[in-house]
Amino acid sequence: MPGDADAVRAALEVAVRAGDDVPIGAVVFAPDGRVLASAHNAREELGDPTAHAEVLALRAAARAYGDGWRLDGCTLAVTVEPCTMCAGALVLARVARLVFGAWEPRTGAVGSLWDVVRDRRLNHRPEVIGGVLAEECAALLDAFFAGHRDGPQR
């Protein structure tokens, strides 16, 4: 398994390919460290409000991993703290670890605004490591939004 910083760096490499979408990248690693899937935000490209990097990467990883929809033992690395939808998806997929870069105080659901993934009422709670390469991840978002008047919209 790559180190946490290397995992987030891999997500950053994917994020820069987002084109007109918010540059967020996600990579799913198998328990042995191999990359199962990666994706960037593609809402604009696909015309799909659920086409967040995490959801797209989880879908592809589930197909590649071969255990149906379960991603037991896998790690999801993402450049930004997941939103509520993505946090719910990674819990339902049984991801073992979440590693992310920048905190998202407006929409983050892994400790900032909510903490969906560590809610004790759920039957699965992944390990969470946040703030890895946070400045690099935030800088990518800042550069993107500097060119958009409406401000951040995940």
Image: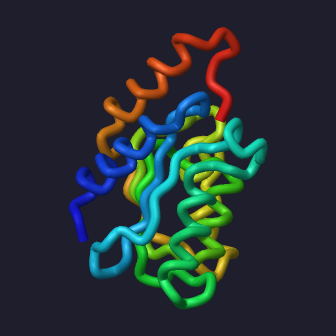
Name the residue located 54 percent from the left edge and 31 percent from the top edge.
Answer: 19
Residue 5 x/y as whole percent:
25, 51
Figure label count: 0
Side of 18 relative to 127 (left or right): right
Quadrant where the N terminus is found in the figure: bottom left
Q: Is residue 20 visible?
A: yes
Q: The C terminus appears in which quarter of the rendering?
A: top right
Compared with 151, 17 (above or below) is below
Q: Can residue 98 be seen in this view?
A: no
- Residue at image location 56% in from the left, 67% down from the top: 58
The image quarter in which residue 55 lies: bottom right
Describe residue 142's horizontal placement relative to residue 68 as left or right. Answer: left
Q: Which residue is drawn at 59% across and 44% down?
A: 41
Colour pattern: rainbow
- Residue 4: name its quadrant: bottom left
Whole-percent x, y for residue 21 in the image: 60, 33
Image position, residue 9 (x, y; %): 29, 47
Q: Which residue lies furthest to the bottom in this view?
A: 67
Residue 121 position in % (x across, y down): 69, 75
Residue 60 left/right relative to 49: left
Residue at 62%, 82% in the rendered image:
69
75 left or right of 106 in image: left
Compared with 70, 75 (above or below) is above
